[in-house]
Image: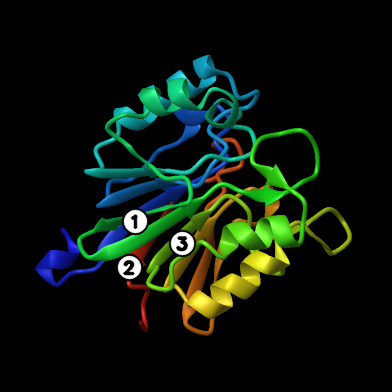
Amino acid sequence: MSASDNAKLTIVAISDTHTFHDRLAVPGGDVLVHAGDMCDEGSLDELTRARDFLAALPHPHKIVVAGNHDLAFERQPEEARRLFEGFIYLQDESWSIEGVTFYDSPWLPRADDWAFMLPRGEPLAEKWAMIPDDTDVLVTHVPPRGIGDEIGAEPWREGCADLLQRVQEVTPALHIFGHVHRMRGRWRIGPTTFVNANTDEGQDPATVIRHPPDGQ
């Protein structure tokens, strides 16, 4: 089934598997999206095992974005990218599938010494400014501020306010992310459907999304 057949594109989204890939039962679909944190410590060995798991899945298109635990993509980028030849690994880049434009970006606010972390404010805003206006499906590792980003007992928000602002400007039909384990879900706000596709180390199932989302 494909968008070119006048049917919706079926997107199967996962994130934050953290090496626990074998716990997951992943349904079929047109596009598989992994929204980051395939690894735990971020080694090439962990990345190889994640690659092998994803390679065995039947989806004809497989899009991967790095998360903060996928350190090899930042520290050993040539070796990491070589492992994912044959996949669609995007880092601040667009890709079109069946006329649908995907854009992926791994960045997130600095909290410790993991990968792809930048200070809040201008450094992150410059990355989000790169998101093209014609993006249909945005994939980031971090949530936008206030949507699927609440952590801890108090309403402390992990998401990025500058990302939210750029999403509101671009208005993609779909924004897929992960990072915050306890907030898996989906929200329709204005023209955009937001999806936290977290699997919480393989304990929660993959999220199946039809694009364009219902009502769009």
Q: Position of residue 111 (x, y in %)?
A: 80, 44
Q: Judging from the image, what secondary structure is the residue with disc 3 in?
A: strand
Instruction: Identify residue for label 1.
Output: 11
Q: Which residue: 28% across, 65% down? A: 100
Instruction: Identify residue for label 2.
Output: 211
Residue 46 in view of the camera = yes
Q: Residue furthest right?
A: 154
Q: Earlier in the sequence, mark 3 or mark 2?
A: 3
Q: Position of residue 55 (x, y in %)?
A: 31, 29
* Residue 183 as seen in the image, left or right of residue 128: right
* Residue 121 as seen in the image, left or right of residue 136: right
Badge 3 crowding class, 10 Å Cα cut-off, few under 14, some 14 to 19, many 20 or more, is many
Q: Position of residue 62 (x, y in %)?
A: 32, 42
Q: Between marks 1 and 3, how big is the CA–CA gap? A: 12 Å
Q: Judging from the image, what secondary structure is the residue with disc 1 in?
A: strand
The quadrant of the rendering that contains the N terminus is bottom left
Q: Which residue: 64% across, 74% down? A: 165
* Residue 6 as seen in the image, left or right of residue 164: left
Q: Is residue 47 above or below residue 201?
A: above
Q: Between marks 1 and 2, how big is the CA–CA gap? A: 7 Å
Instruction: Identify residue for label 3.
Output: 138
Q: Amino acid at mark 2?
A: His
The quadrant of the rendering that contains the C terminus is bottom left
Q: Judging from the image, what secondary structure is the residue with disc 2 in?
A: strand
Q: Is residue 38 above or below residue 193?
A: above
